[in-house]
Image: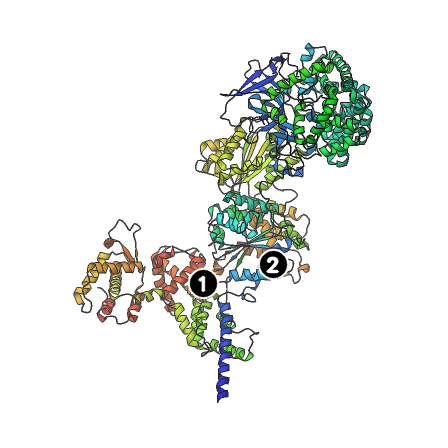
Amino acid sequence: MDNIIRKYLIMTLFKYGYIFQVQMILRERFCHQRLPEKPVGMESQHKHLLELLRRTAVHGESNSVLIVGPRGSGKTMLLNCVLRELLEVKDVNKNVLPVHLNGLLQTDDRIALKEITRQLNLENVVGDKVFGSFAENLAFLLEALKKGDRSSSRPVLFILDEFDLFAHHKNQTLLYNLLDVSQSAQAPVAVIGLTCRLDVLELLEKRVKSRFSHRQIHLLSSLSFIQYLDNVRSQLSLPQDFPDTKFYDEWNDSIKTLCEDQLVVDVLQSHYNSSKDFRSLHLLLMLALSRVSASKPAIKPTDLLEASRVCMVDSKANILHGLSILELCLIIAMKHLNDIYEGEPFNFQMVHNEFKKFLQRKSHSIHNFDKPVVIKAFEHLQQLELIKSMDSSTAKIQKEYQLMKLLLDHSQIMEALQKYPQCPTDVKQWAMSAFG
Amino acid sequence: MVRYFTRLRVRRIYKWGGRPYIFDRKLKSYGFEYLNMSVEGQEAVTTVTPGQYILIEGNDDEYPFVAKLLKLFGDESHKQKKALVQWFLRLSEVPQNKKLLLGRSPHPQEIFYYLGRACDDEINAESILGTVHVQHVPEDTPFPEPGTKDTLYVKLSWDTKAFNVLDPVLMQDTSASTPPKPAPPLFTPCASPTATPVSRGPVHHALPTPDPTVMRRAGSVSDTRATMSAGKRSTLEAESIHSASKLSASKILSAKRRGSAADTPGVRKKLQLSIGASPGKKMTRADVLCELLDEEMESEKVVSLKLSSSVSHSLQHGCSLSPMRSGCKTPNGQRRFPWKLTSISLDRLSPTALGEQDFSSDLLLAVIPLALEDEVFEAGLPTDAGSANTPKKRQATPRRNYVRGQKPTTPSRRKESAMAIREPALGVLAEEDSEDSPMQPIALTPRSKRKSAQLVSLRIRKQLNLLDNTQELISDGDDDCFVPSKKELQSSSNEEKTDSEEETVAKKTRGRNCKTSVRTPHKTPSKKVTPSTPRCATPCIPSRTVPARQPGNILEEARARLHVSSVPESLPCREQEFQDIYNFVESKVMDGTGGCMYISGVPGTGKTATIHEVIRCLQHASDMDEIPTFRFIEINGMKMTDPHQAYVQILQKLTDQKVTADHAAALLEKRFSNPAPKKETTVLLVDELDLLWTRKQNVMYNLFDWPTRRHARLVVLTIANTMDLPERIMINRVASRLGLTRMSFQPYSFKQLQQIITSRLNKVKAFEEDALQLVSRKVAALSGDARRCLDICRRATEICEHSASHPSSAGLVKMSHVMEALDEMFSSSYITAIRCASLQEQLFLRAVIAEFRRLGLEEATFQQVFVQHRTLSRVEGLQPISVSEGLAVCQRLGACRLLLLEASRLDMLQRVRLNVSQDDVLYALKPVRD
């Protein structure tokens, strides 16, 4: 008896350890902390980019390329895979200087230049500080790049994340200069732009555009649902080198059965229909994974369903659930006004009138509120951005007469009313009735 | 240093001093003895006399131009004051790209003797700021310790191509300030310093009697340089009466030299060399030097021979010239030679040390007959009488030469050489004489009588002097002011008096400068050379550890050649434009005038490349001496952060100064509007002109206004994309200044593109003919952008390489490869993007179109579209999505720019538009619906 209990305890302890490990491995995958072994479904693009960067690194050939694909399609992942592979090559290892820039961080050329000089460790950098004015920095960088030549200086890889934002910088000075260097006999550079905009070339000025090599690598996944499902399975499966084979087999079997479950397939299908990218899938799987524990050492179809529900939930409907009855009544009054005036804006006075009419006609459950209280509720709705002011200048017009619009759909309101806990029936009826 | 007044605000008053003499009757110009300058409201009067080194107002207040004053002259009315100068350059005036030729870090006070001929040597005398002290430092000695801030040092000369060791003779001739005397001024008025070592003076007609003092002074004043730069025709030359016979003058001169040197075989050798060079007159200095070089070894022997004759002693420097000059090639020979001379001269002196007077009179004796002889010559050839001065002068300054001869030796060296001499005491004496007699360069003569008395103090002073190189060098410069007169040599007492007289006068004229330098000895040793730190760190990208791999096969080779960055051997298809621009720039450079040119053309039509090619050709021509040298500066509107930075960049490239934009504008304005004489033509390329647009357009205005200035010598070539830029963005006064010299680069036709690729490939057979034609036709039809064309070809080679099973087995680039490359680069990605979109996204696009059709507008709010979307998804049998999800779908499409959206804070009310045509969307969605 004692033995059995001890055995059981040891087993549970091991299980805890394994579960912990599984969660570690999968979390790393889903949170993009570790690059995948091989980018899935983009082999030709991978080869193209690798060849291009390899030529820059080995032959000193200047290049420019754009990687274009929708959000979450794996642009950065592809680039990082390529860079990892590139740096594994012996010749290249110490020979390239990658410079990472992001359009969201380097919001203008001044900051971008400082960042470049910092990352390149040019002479006007001491520690982490870059000296000199904007003009000096630009002259300095250009001078530095000009000094180099194809065969002797180290190739610089400029990686511009959110490339389209760089195109909004004044005069596109940075882009012009980088692309100009890539087209002239100076230090070898590779300019790699990452963007999700398909029309990015139209953003470039024509002299900048002429200097760009017009290479674009498109990452548009044409993944079928079967492949998508396979991918889910492989994403959830444990790697070969998992320490315990028994647990490994158990887990992978459970994943296999999970992916064949009709409920799961339906959930994934709706997800697939909504978006094909892996980032949203990872979010879903992450939520499901967080429900795994030692007592429940596998992902169940219901977990996935629940996760999907969380993912797909309508945020506005959630807000509506938290409103007071008065505020809900105001929303309903606005809905009626919308119906009457066909989406024309309204002001507080109109809403208040509508609300008062409702109270006069058939209000038993709701007692009469003072006007200031109603105004307060109205302002609260405005703060929640359920209604939005149409006038740009708010100061001039009195609060009661500011024109407003409702940012809710009818269906959202009705849905919220159904779910609203202990909603008075007369309010419900008022909402359902065609006209106030 | 004499405090010169650099600020323009200070008003200086210039007055001629001394009695004017007419030297050109035709032009009615007068020469003057000296120039008095005073500052308004101040008592102090600075006197500038020919032979002195002066500062001339330049572009930079901090660093005025340095020159040696050769002559002062003016017109009849005395209104115009002009001066003839020999220029010196600061390093900052040397073109940026040539600075490296120096091969070492320059001394902060270093200047270079200017041997070029692009500079006008006639200046407005009123631009003289004051005097400065210039010191010649022999090539092998280090720069004096930097404590003496006011002295500038000359070590090398600069002939616009290279730095050369400065011929000490050139510097030596500069015996300085002729003190103002009641006697008629005797310096020669119209010596053209760049032309011949001649100083001609009508004065000599008036004074047929040889007067050594006069001679010497005349000789010392004129700068006798042996430059053969005949190409230069200075304005002065034209004015000179002798200008017509200038060429013959030099011939006669050399003949005279031959005559005068006849009695000293060693001298003749040297002189004949220069004779050989002078008649041709085309010979550059370098040629002469080459010849001299050949005889270097010989000359060494010659010198030792020559020393037997006292007259030839004066020519030591003339001889040492050749080895010094060749110093860059044979540093050893050059180093040894001067010292050898010194030791020899000391050696020679030692027997006569007790009777130095004998020696000096000996010298004088030698001088007088020669001088006489020259005068005879002059009488025979009245037109070229003045040219006889040089030989006289050479012999007229023997002791100075001697003193000079010792200068190159550093204290330790000197000691060494002195000790090496058989009679140490005398050696010391000789040394002392040269060293501690800053006031009396001719100390040998009078002081030697009190030798015993001096010997005691001498030893003490010697100790000091050994440490005191700088001081000594400076005082040496002062020595040059003193020219021994005939009287001096006749009686020592008399001489002493004159000497002191002269000294005081000289001091007066030279002002504070000399006094301070003479009186305040420097005790610090001169071993240390200031470490001149470069202005800023030189930026550079670290170099790679493994060298770049060279192209391995034909395709790689082709790819390397097709890269836009590779500079082709020639630029095909732009011959006409090339010729036009070339002619334009060449004519402007030749005439020394300025002008503007506007060049337009769509990107990638070879505008900048053509201009670079033109400049390359012109640089080559100027290297070949076919056209005057010019300076090329390039700025690019895109490569600066602000239009006003253009000034900063231009100034930095011109003078290597770093100043603020406003200051730079002021300096440039001054530079281009003032008749600063030392100026070569500047060719300025302004790329991407449209970016220099400012609201007031002052940058553009200035750029186009400068070339119109009389003294600017600026050629501005501007490039922009649009043909009508002047009409569109420029206000009238700017457009008018730009002028009508315009050129437009047409987009390349397909034949031209094909030719470009073929010429780039240059027999590397990598493409099929048809494939090339396809590319060039396609690009020509679209944009005519050569860059695009090359990029496509490059991509095609890649595709070809990948398609082959093995990289080495890849054949020619075929049509199919080119087609694929064209598809990649030209095809729109929208349709693929729609096809690859998720189901809901596609549905949303359909909803958008449906809503547009319903509304009859190309715009709808999200709310409206979402209603459609919901209906459509019911039709399709899908679960309707929530509003949040619908918004997410809409945002994703917006991020790809398939849809154009308003700001997302409008939430459901944001308006939606399609960024693709409806037909494209329907076409893309068709297969999905089926």
Residue B167 seen in the current view: no
Check disc 2 and report the residue beneath it. Answer: A51
Image quadrant assignment for residue B323: top right
**Residue at position x 43%, y 55% from top?**
B915
The type of residue carrying mark 2 is Glu
Which corner quadrant holds the C terminus of chain A? bottom left
Q: Are marks 1 and 2 on the same chain?
A: no
Q: Nearer the viewer, mark 1 or mark 2?
A: 2
Residue A159 seen in the current view: yes
**Side of B891 relative to B633 (left or right):** left
- Mark 2 secondary-structure assignment: helix
Residue B202 in picture, x, y percent from top left: 67, 13
Residue B91 in picture, x, y percent from top left: 62, 34
- Mark 1 secondary-structure assignment: helix
Mark 2, other Cα within 10 Å: few <14 / some 14–19 / many ≥20: some
Q: Which mark is residue B322?
A: none
Check disc 1 and report the residue beneath it. Answer: B925
In this view, the residue in front, B752 or B420, is B420
Residue B247 in picture, x, y percent from top left: 71, 20
